Image: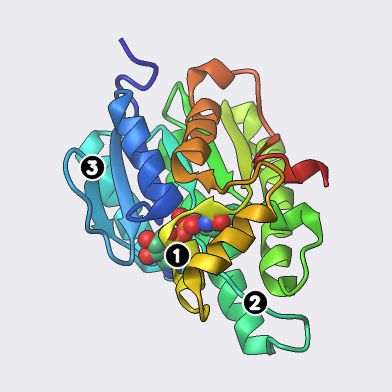
């Protein structure tokens, strides 16, 4: 008997990095899991469903398809996200709108589509993926950090609104996590190996967080073990939180 036996989950951005690690862990612990992604190539037992969180019709259809396949929906992991670098002078209005559309409104759209199903669940939980960037005051991350700060506020608001319906809402704040996303950033450096070593050296723990470590925190918050926890954020950042 595993804690997710009989539960059905969707993970946005579930075909890579933190999302894929989370989907894999939830499935290993008994959940049926659909990965909603622009590029939904995942192996069994995961179900891949093509979806774009910036497109309301697309995300509604994908959520409905997952719920139809599983006969309902209990867990939502709002994980799809994109990065942005620079100061407020470096990103124009169109870029601010584009990144907010994925990182913030994408969670709103997915949640809106999922709520009618979650209301029928007796173990309903939502976990949003924020970032240490929301609170760390990192340089060259004005837009990205602001979207992730909005995710903290959204989590608190949703937790308050949906607690009376028995739906818990929490979020995780990963530090720099070793995913394809970070791999792509490192690949742009003149010397990716040296850049990786420098990045690791900047972490208080001397290493990057793994996608599996973030997934473990998400799984905890999604599980019935966290039945008394809503509106909270859990840092998984190797100690950077305290700096
Ligand atoms: P990743 O790039 O490896 O995976 C992101 C996935 O999201 C991809 O599969 C991509 O196709 C999907 N995606 C992007 N836009 C989408 C859209 N419009 N609709 C549907 N799917 C879409 O990234 P990751 O590192 O695993 O990051 C996952 C989440 O974790 C993001 O929200 C990110 O902000 C957050 N995060 C990552 C780190 C890190 O260091 N990697 C740190 C803190 C927070």
Which of the 4 image quadrants contains residue 163?
top right
Q: Colour mode? A: rainbow
Mark 2 Cα shell of 10 Å, populated few (<14), some (14-19), many (≥20): some
In the rendering, which numbered label is found on residue 85?
2
Residues under numbered marks 1 and 3 in contact, where contact means CB atoms less than 8 Å apart: no
Per the image, the residue denoted by label 1 is 183
As drawn, which residue projects farthest toward the top? 1
Q: Is residue 160 above or below residue 180?
A: above
Q: Is 99 on the left or on the right of 186, as rendered?
A: right
The numbered mark, 1 or 3, whose residue comes first in the sequence reads 3
At horizontal 36% and vertical 37% (from top left) the residue drawn is 9
Mark 1 Cα shell of 10 Å, populated few (<14), some (14-19), many (≥20): few
SS at circle 1: helix
At horizontal 67% and vertical 64% (from top left) the residue drawn is 147
Where the N terminus falls, by quadrant? top left
Circle 1 or circle 3, nearest the eye:
1
The answer to whether the residue bearing label 2 lies less than 8 angstroms from the nearest atom of ligand 1 is: no
- The percent coordinates of residue 111 (x first, y second) are 51, 49
The numbered mark, 2 or 1, whose residue comes first in the sequence reads 2
Q: Is residue 35 visible?
A: yes
Which of the 4 image quadrants contains residue 221?
top right
Per the image, the residue denoted by label 3 is 46
The numbered mark, 2 or 3, whose residue comes first in the sequence reads 3
- The percent coordinates of residue 91 (x first, y second) are 68, 86
- The percent coordinates of residue 146 (x first, y second) are 73, 65
In the rendering, which numbered label is found on residue 18?
none
Q: CA distance from mark 1 to mark 3?
A: 24 Å
């Amino acid at each position: 008997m595993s804690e997710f036996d009989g539960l059905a989950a969707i993970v946005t951005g579930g075909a890579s990095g933190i999302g894929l690690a989370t989907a894999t862990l939830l499935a290993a612990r008994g959940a049926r899991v659909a990965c909603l992604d622009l590029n939904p190539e995942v192996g069994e037992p995961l179900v891949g469903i093509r979806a774009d969180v910036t497109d309301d019709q697309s995300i509604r259809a994908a959520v409905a398809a997952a719920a139809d396949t599983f006969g309902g929906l209990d867990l939502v992991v709002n994980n799809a996200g994109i990065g942005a670098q620079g100061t407020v002078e470096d990103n124009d209005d169109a870029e601010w709108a584009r990144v907010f559309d994925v990182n913030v409104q994408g969670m709103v759209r997915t949640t809106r589509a999922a709520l009618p199903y979650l209301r029928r669940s007796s173990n309903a939980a939502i976990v949003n993926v924020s970032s240490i960037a929301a609170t760390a005051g990192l340089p060259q991350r004005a837009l990205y950090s602001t979207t992730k700060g909005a995710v903290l506020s959204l989590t608190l608001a949703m937790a308050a609104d949906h607690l009376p319906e028995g739906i818990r809402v929490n979020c995780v704040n990963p530090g720099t996590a070793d995913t394809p996303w970070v791999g792509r950033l490192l690949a742009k450096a003149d010397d990716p190996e040296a850049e990786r070593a420098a990045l690791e050296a900047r972490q208080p723990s001397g290493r990057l967080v793994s996608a599996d470590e973030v997934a473990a925190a998400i799984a905890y918050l999604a599980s019935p073990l966290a039945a008394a926890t809503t509106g909270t954020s859990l840092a998984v950042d190797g100690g950077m939180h305290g700096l």
